[in-house]
Amino acid sequence: MSNQKDYREYLERQEELKSANMGHYFYDQYKRFVEPFKLYGNVYYVGDSWVCAYIIDTGEGLLLLDAGNCGAAEMMIHSIWSAGFNPADIKWIVLSHGHVDHIGAVNFLRNMFGCKVYLGEPDARMFEEMPELSYIQQSPDIMQSLFAPDVLINDGDVIKFGNIEISFYLVPGHTLGTIACFFDICDEEQGTKRAGYFGGFGFNTLTKEYLTEIGDALFSHRELFLNSLKKVRDQKVEVFLANHTINNQTVEKRELMKKAPGYNPFVNSQSWAEYLDVKRDAFIEFMNDPGNS
Ligand SMILES: [Zn+2]
């Protein structure tokens, strides 16, 4: 035993984790801090500049839509306070899917405040049967652990949270338990708008290499993903909530809001269908690329 050797190994582990596959996503998270803001009505942005998260004030408790990156829980707690809310008032956490970058604050918030966690049923099964597909091993936070959700979301579920009613669909592809959801956002001055959330657009889990590894030899997940986009494309959505900021330039839109008070670029009844079409076309191109096909 040698303390010097242990310390050297600790430094080496840090380097190893930083240079691992997704390592850079978990370091210097404060550099991705975004000042929280009211997005529309009772929906507030509390995510960072990479991964989105929202507080929805249901009138009878708060709902947290996605729980941020592993290692970013403290930053999210700060954001929730800064937005004018008490994290202890979070009654429900709804997760878009079971990947490491959306579950960061779950254990802390549930253990502290007893909030109920909702996750698509297939991803709850993934946590049990193939936990490695959550990518939790990519996070340098060895204290993090997966969890069994309190409520499993199934296709077609309609669930009430305070005075908000959310319609859920399973949109398998990015993971099998990825959800899409739709609900009304209330704004006393500007009226009620329909919000839409698509919980996972990434193609990283749709490469032939990945699908072969998980035993999908026929690459059927690719068809599932295209069908999922089609399934919810014609939903009425006036406020498209991004899953990652890149989906709708969340940070840039926030800047526009600041420059032109009264203008809300998040209100747009075309952007949902347009973006789902963009992803469909990009995915077809991705499949036609010999590197991925
Ligand atoms: Zn993901």
Image: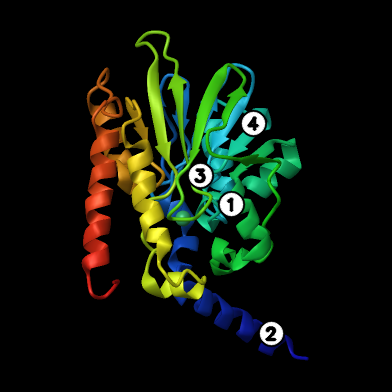
Residue indicated by mark 1: 122
Specify the amino acid type for callout 3.
Ser
Residue lying farthest to the front in this orientation: 218
Q: Quadrant of the C terminus?
A: bottom left
Q: Residues within 10 Å of mark 2 (few under 14, many from 20)?
A: few
Specify the amino acid type for callout 4.
Ile
Residue lying farthest to the right in this orientation: 1
Check disc 4 and report its element: helix, strand or loop: strand
Q: Which label lies toward us, 3 or 4?
A: 3
Residue drawn at (51%, 79%) of the image: 16
Residue 107 percent location from the top left of the image: 68, 49
Disc assigned to residue 90: 4
Residue indicated by mark 3: 96
Q: Nearer the viewer, residue 154 or 32?
A: 154
Q: Which label lies toward us, 3 or 2?
A: 3
Q: Which label lies toward us, 4 or 1?
A: 1
Residue 89 falls left or right of residue 56? right
Residues at marks 1 and 3 touching, judged by CB atoms closer than 8 Å: no
Residue drawn at (78%, 91%) of the image: 1
Please report whichever mark, 1 or 3, sits nearer to the chain's N-terminal start: 3
Q: Nearer the viewer, residue 111 or 210?
A: 210
Please report whichever mark, 3 or 2, sits nearer to the chain's N-terminal start: 2
Q: CA–CA distance between discs 2 and 4?
A: 40 Å
Residue 280 falls left or right of residue 200? left
Disc assigned to residue 6: 2
Disc assigned to residue 83: none
Q: CA–CA distance between discs 3 and 2?
A: 39 Å
Ligand 1 within 8 Å, label 3 CB: yes
Q: Quadrant of residue 120?
A: top right
Specify the amino acid type for callout 2.
Asp
Q: CA–CA distance between discs 4 and 1?
A: 25 Å
